């Protein structure tokens, strides 16, 4: 059945949607692109940040691309993100100023839904009272992902970061955690409240939608992914601009810096950043770069 409504996975999957995996010639292609300038190459690979046991193993072409790279670049520095102190820092970034409460930002109906949700999950009903609206949405997304078996330790970033540590391969990030966290602060509170209400109203869709998204990512079902995420975001121009387009534009000069160097660099970012208008791929092509999509290895 088609999914027309958002679920909590929109927050998690704005950075891991995948599209255009089937070329017009019918060849099955993964979300990995290559840009070369003669003496160096850059790979741009679309990531899924959270995966489940049943999603393993990831397609081997990702591992093969990693082996070719001299360096791996994530959206954020994974060494910093995995530092235990980061959890406390993120909580501080997601806290409202002293004297404020979530009731100052959301209406009574939304607050009632949130408290009912927490009660049903056997969690303290006041858990979100001091959270910023964006932190509420991200936390809800994390809760629902965990309930459906999706885990960051199985995600692409964690797997490849740990491998890079074992291999002594350098890694770095495109953004700081603080910057990523600030993106939700750029959205109108009414938009975040709308996203939360739509998600709470459609909890029954989350498991099936996560199945569909990850299956589409692994097999290249571009039509399903487009229906699930990209078309929905197209109607929310502010959300798309803040969470995707602005960041894509920030990344392109950094990617070009790597291309101008001598090393082969793998950029592993949420695959929603690599598809559609004003994606990283689109912006690079508009600047005259030739970007080729890889094919699945047999």
Image: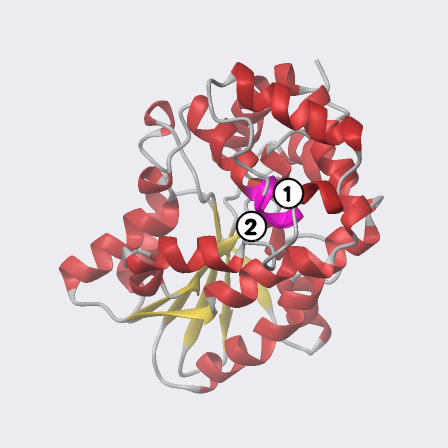
Q: Which residues are magenta?
A: 130-138
Measured Cα–Cα span from mark 1 to mark 2: 8 Å
In the image, what residue occupies the spot 63% across and 49% down? 134
Place of residue 221 in the rendered image (x, y in percent of width and height, measured from the top left): 60, 31
| Placement of the C terminus among the 4 image quadrants | top left
Q: Is residue 205 magenta?
A: no
- Where is residue 208, by image quadrant? top right
Tell me if 19 is positioned left or right of 79 in this view.
Answer: right
Judged from the image, the secondary structure of the residue bearing numbered disc 1 is: loop
Place of residue 97 in the rendered image (x, y in percent of width and height, measured from the top left): 60, 59
* 158 lies above or below 247: above
Label placed on residue 289:
none
Secondary structure character of the magenta stretch overall: helix
| Placement of the N terminus among the 4 image quadrants | top right
Tell me if 168 is positioned left or right of 256 in this view.
Answer: left
Q: Nearer the viewer, residue 200 or 133?
A: 133
Place of residue 69 in the rendered image (x, y in percent of width and height, measured from the top left): 31, 66
Label 1, residues with CA under 10 Å away: few <14, some 14-19, many ≥20? many
Tell me if 170 is positioned left or right of 135 in this view.
Answer: left
In the image, what residue occupies the spot 64% across and 42% down? 19
* 57 lies above or below 153: above
In the image, what residue occupies the spot 31% across and 58% down? 66
Q: Pointer 1: what residue? A: 19
Earlier sequence position, callout 1 versus callout 2:
1
- Where is residue 149, by image quadrant? top left
Judged from the image, the secondary structure of the residue bearing numbered disc 2 is: helix
Q: Is residue 131 magenta?
A: yes
* 220 lies above or below 33: above
Determine whether label 1 and label 2 are within 8 Å by CB.
yes
Q: Pointer 2: what residue? A: 271
Q: Is residue 18 visible?
A: no
Tell me if 193 is positioned left or right of 174 in this view.
Answer: right
């Amino acid at each position: 059945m088609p999914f027309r409504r958002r679920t909590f996975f929109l927050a998690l999957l704005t950075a891991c949607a995948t599209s255009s995996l089937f070329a017009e010639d019918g060849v099955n292609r993964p979300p990995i692109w290559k840009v070369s300038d003669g003496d160096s190459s850059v790979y741009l690979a679309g990531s899924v940040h959270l995966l489940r046991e049943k999603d393993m193993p990831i397609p081997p072409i990702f591992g093969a691309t990693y082996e070719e790279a001299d360096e791996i670049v994530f959206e954020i520095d994974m060494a910093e993100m995995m530092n235990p102190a980061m959890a406390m820092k993120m909580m501080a970034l997601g806290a409202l100023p002293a004297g404020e409460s979530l009731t100052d930002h959301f209406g009574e109906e939304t607050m009632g839904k949130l408290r009912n949700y927490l009660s049903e999950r056997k969690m303290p009903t006041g858990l979100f009272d001091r959270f910023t609206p964006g932190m509420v949405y991200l936390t809800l997304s994390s809760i629902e992902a965990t309930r459906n078996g999706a885990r960051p330790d199985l995600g692409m970033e964690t797997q490849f970061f740990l491998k890079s540590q074992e291999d002594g391969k350098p890694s770095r990030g495109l953004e700081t955690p603080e910057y990523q966290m600030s993106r939700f602060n750029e959205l109108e509170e009414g938009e975040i409240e709308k996203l939360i209400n739509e998600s709470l109203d459609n909890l029954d869709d989350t498991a099936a939608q996560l199945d569909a998204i990850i299956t589409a990512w692994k097999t290249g079902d571009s039509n399903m992914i487009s229906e699930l995420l990209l078309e929905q975001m197209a109607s929310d121009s502010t959300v798309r601009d803040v969470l995707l387009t602005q960041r894509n534009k920030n990344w392109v000069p950094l990617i070009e810096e790597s291309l101008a160097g001598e090393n082969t660099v793998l950029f592993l970012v949420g695959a929603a950043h690599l598809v559609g208008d004003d994606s990283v791929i689109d912006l690079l092509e508009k600047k005259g770069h030739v970007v080729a999509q890889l094919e699945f290895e047999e």
